[in-house]
Image (cartoon, rainbow, N blue to C red):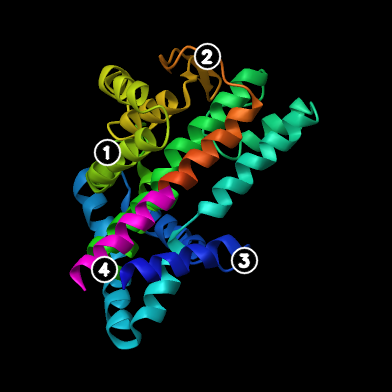
Amino acid sequence: MNALIALGALIVDQLLGELSRWHPLVGFGRLADRVEGRLNDGRDGKLKGVVALLITTFPFVLLAGVLESTWGIWVSLVVLYFALGARSLADHARAVASELERDDMETAREKVGRMVSRDSTDMDRVSVIRATIESVLENGLDAIFGALFWFFIAGAPGVVFYRLVNTLDAMWGYRNERFSAFGWFTAKLDDLLNWIPARLVAASYALMGNRAQAMDCWRDQAGLLASPNGGPVMTAGAGALDIELGGPAAYQGKRVEKPLFGGDNLPDLSDIYRALDLVYKSLLLWLLMALTWSLLIA
């Protein structure tokens, strides 16, 4: 049944996309800001970070469980729809590609800046393409596959907990003076929740692309990247597409030397669409496997 619910939620996501107003995660973000503002006072940061995560997430997890037990599949479908962002991810990537097709680099830089945390003001064409593809590959984990995995494992409460922790990590998971202690637990928990899904996604990218090269890149290059989950996902994805990603990037005005990874070919505009195809082919693989499992245990 969960496989059919997932299919339904993905169809709704493709038809409607993300709500432009009144999205639950926007309201949750405001709540998280208020909680952080009250608790993050520089004392007992790690402990207060744990408390903040628990009081912001568990009421909604419990509510999801109660509603799912009462109204069943309809609650599950709606909850999963709100957790997914497949169409939004594709729309953002295609918007960048559209500006590149028109050679409007200024607008392309502005639009890729909505997808990534790095500075985009001075990016050249290849850097814009690389950043877009990296975002597609890595955010496929957060916006699609991680949510599906935890929905299959624990239903609506599982996907709510995953998505809220993921949102908190995006808000509190910075390694700076303000959040290094307060956001420590959230960042570690997000890494833990994504550990298995990330490796399943990396394997899916490999199966749907250049399999041998994807596996080689994953094995040899994943450790070069800072993220324990982004490393497998992005190196396998780059290898599957046979393109070179990574390289220097600027964050808050400072140049950071990041490693190159993937294949030997410089990415071009068409590779943005190929990256989206890879994500959607992997999504189809997940749905087929989930449906097959449902039939086997029925």
For the record, the magenta segment spans 283-298
Mark 3–mark 4 contact, CB under 8 Å? no
Residue closest to the eye, 288 or 225: 288
Please report whichever mark, 3 or 1, sits nearer to the chain's N-terminal start: 3
Please report whichever mark, 3 or 4, sits nearer to the chain's N-terminal start: 3
Tell me the tag on residue 21. 3
Residue beneath disc 2 = 265
Marks 3 and 4, Cα distance to the nearest angstrom?
Answer: 38 Å
Q: Looking at the picture, which amino acid does disc 3 mark? A: Arg
Q: Residue at x 79, y 26 (%)?
A: 103
Q: Position of residue 11 (x, y in %)?
A: 52, 65
Please report whichever mark, 2 or 1, sits nearer to the chain's N-terminal start: 1
17 vs 141: above or below = below
Q: Looking at the picture, which amino acid does disc 4 mark? A: Leu
Mark 3–mark 2 contact, CB under 8 Å? no
Q: Looking at the picture, which amino acid does disc 2 mark? A: Asn
Please report whichever mark, 4 or 2, sits nearer to the chain's N-terminal start: 2
Find residue 34 and report its image quarter. Answer: bottom left
Marks 4 and 1, Cα distance to the nearest angstrom?
Answer: 25 Å
Comparing labels 2 and 1, the label whose residue is closer to the camera: 2
2 vs 93: above or below = below
Residue beneath disc 4 = 295
Mark 3–mark 1 contact, CB under 8 Å? no
Which residue occupies the extreme bottom position in the image? Answer: 70
Please report whichever mark, 4 or 1, sits nearer to the chain's N-terminal start: 1
Please report whichever mark, 3 or 2, sits nearer to the chain's N-terminal start: 3
Marks 4 and 2, Cα distance to the nearest angstrom?
Answer: 42 Å
